[in-house]
Amino acid sequence: MNDMKKKLDFKVLAIMGVVVFSACGSDSDLFNPEKAAAKKEAQYASAFVQRYGEIAVDQDWGFGVTPTTRVANTNSNQWKDFTEVPGSVTATEKEVVTEWFKTYRNPQSIGGDWTDFFVQHVSGSHSNMDFLVAASDDHINNFNATEGAIMLMQNSGTSSFGYRASLDGKMHYNYTIQYIEGAYYVGFDFEATGQNPNQQVAADGYYSDWIVKISPAVYTNAYRIIAEDLGDSDDFDFNDVVFDVATNGGATIITL
């Protein structure tokens, strides 16, 4: 009886060994997370290309610096064709926001970086401030501290803002970003550091000398992509990166 049981156990083990060996041989990546992730990554890449086409070689996905052209889109009559254009700054909004910046001295700036955004003039009290810039000195066209309505910036950024002081001919980056009454505003503190005494004005810590409103560009034909970092095969929750993909004039626009 014992000999028969041993023979039976041996046969069961032998059959199990054949089954496991066959399974590994027919689908080796079943027990290889790296191969499984690579296969899934290839499927996702293929689906993306089929839907949107090949990704531009200079696309940085919002994570780095690339040689893309930074530009103010001055074709305001076309904005409504592909974006949600923000409404005009109201008189009440201007009053509330301007008073806020005049009240709070040296407020801590809010961080963040949008690549595509609208800029709207709110208020300005210095005629010696002009040439508004964003990111790496990207010129925001048609703006100075006393006039200017709205401009769309694309492939730029909100990580930095500055202006040129005509009093000394220099660029200055005394700005703060604040969230007030449900919107974002950039305030500037005027200063001039020329060689002559009449070219010198010290900053006073109040960022009310020039105020603009910034709003992220929302593309009306955009699709939201929710992606997963397949380098971590144990985590497939699809929340590692979220970005919007839109097309404009035959070009693919990707914004985080």
Image (cartoon, rainbow, N blue to C red):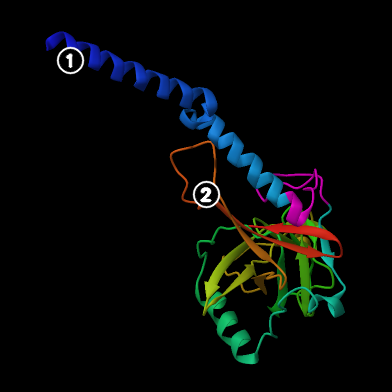
Q: Determine the image quadrant of residue 64.
A: top right
Three-letter amino acid code of the residue under disc 1:
Lys
In front of the other: 203 or 6 = 6
Three-letter amino acid code of the residue under disc 2:
Asp
Relative vertical location of residue 165 with respect to residue 14 in this rendering, above or below: below
Tell me which segment is drawn in magenta: 49-68
In front of the other: 194 or 46 = 46
Residue 201 picture location, percent across and down: 69, 63
Which label was assigned to residue 219?
A: none
Q: Is residue 24 visible?
A: yes
Residue found at the very far bottom of the displayed protein: 91
Q: Residue at x 65, y 40 (%)?
A: 42
Residue 51 picture location, percent across and down: 74, 56
Q: Determine the image quadrant of residue 11.
A: top left
In front of the other: 127 or 112 = 112
Residue 256 picture location, percent across and down: 63, 57
| Residue that numbered label 2 is attached to | 240
Q: Is residue 57 magenta?
A: yes
Q: Residue at x 41, y 24 (%)?
A: 19
Question: First in sequence: mark 2 or mark 1?
Answer: 1
Residue found at the very far left of the displayed protein: 1
Which label was assigned to residue 5?
A: 1
- Crowding near pointer 1: few (<14 within 10 Å), some, many (20+)? few
In front of the other: 249 or 115 = 249
Q: Secondary structure at mark 2?
A: loop
Look at the magenta stretch and give its main secondary structure.
loop
Whether the residues at callouts 2 and 1 have beta carbons within 8 Å, the answer is no
